[in-house]
Amino acid sequence: MKNEKHIAMEIINPHAAGIDIGSRSHFVAVGQYDDDVREFGVYNEDLKAISDWLKESQ
């Protein structure tokens, strides 16, 4: 059985993404579910992949 945790918060801007910038990886969230969060690397090709994923998720 999967243990799901959800935090009830008011959605202020449904078209905004959350980005956690780290020295080894970047996490990008475009929604509130696990499938809406991806981890990317820190190099130029990874930043391009972030840009592409954000455009696809609009």
Image: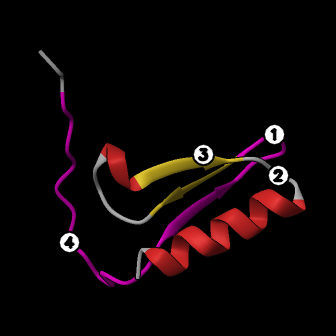
* Residue marked by disc 1: 24
Identify the residue position indicated by label 4 in the image. Answer: 10
Q: Main secondary structure of the magenta part?
A: loop
Q: Secondary structure at mark 1?
A: loop
Spatial CA span between label 3 and label 2: 10 Å
User: Residue 46: x and y, percent?
Assistant: 77, 57
Rounded to the nearest angstrom, the CA distance separating label 1 from label 3 is: 10 Å
Residue linked to disc 2: 42
**As drawn, is 16 to the left or to the right of 55?**
left
Amino acid under disc 1: Arg
| Residue at horizontal 68 percent and vertical 63 percent from the top | 49
What's the amino acid at mark 3? Glu
Marks 2 and 1, the one that precedes in the sequence? 1
Q: CA distance from mark 2 to mark 1?
A: 6 Å
Q: Quadrant of residue 58?
A: bottom left
Q: Which residue is mark 3?
A: 39
Q: Is residue 20 magenta?
A: yes
Q: Residue 44, image x and y in percent? A: 88, 63
14 w.r.t. 6: above or below: below
User: Quick check: 46 above or below 18?
Assistant: above
Quadrant of image for the N terminus: top left
Query: Is the residue 57 above or below the residue 50 in the image?
Result: below
Whether the residues at callouts 4 and 2 have beta carbons within 8 Å, the answer is no
How far apart, in angstroms, are the residues tagged by discs 3 and 4? 25 Å
| Magenta segment includes 8 | yes
| First in residue order: circle 4 vs circle 2 | 4
Inter-mark Cα distance, 4 to 1: 31 Å
Region of the chain picked out in magenta, as a range: 4-25
Q: Are marks 3 and 4 in contact (CB under 8 Å)?
A: no
- Marks 4 and 2 sit apart, C-alpha to C-alpha, by 31 Å
Spot occupied by residue 48 in the image (x, y as percentages of width and height): 75, 69
Q: Please name the amino acid that badge 2 sits on.
A: Val
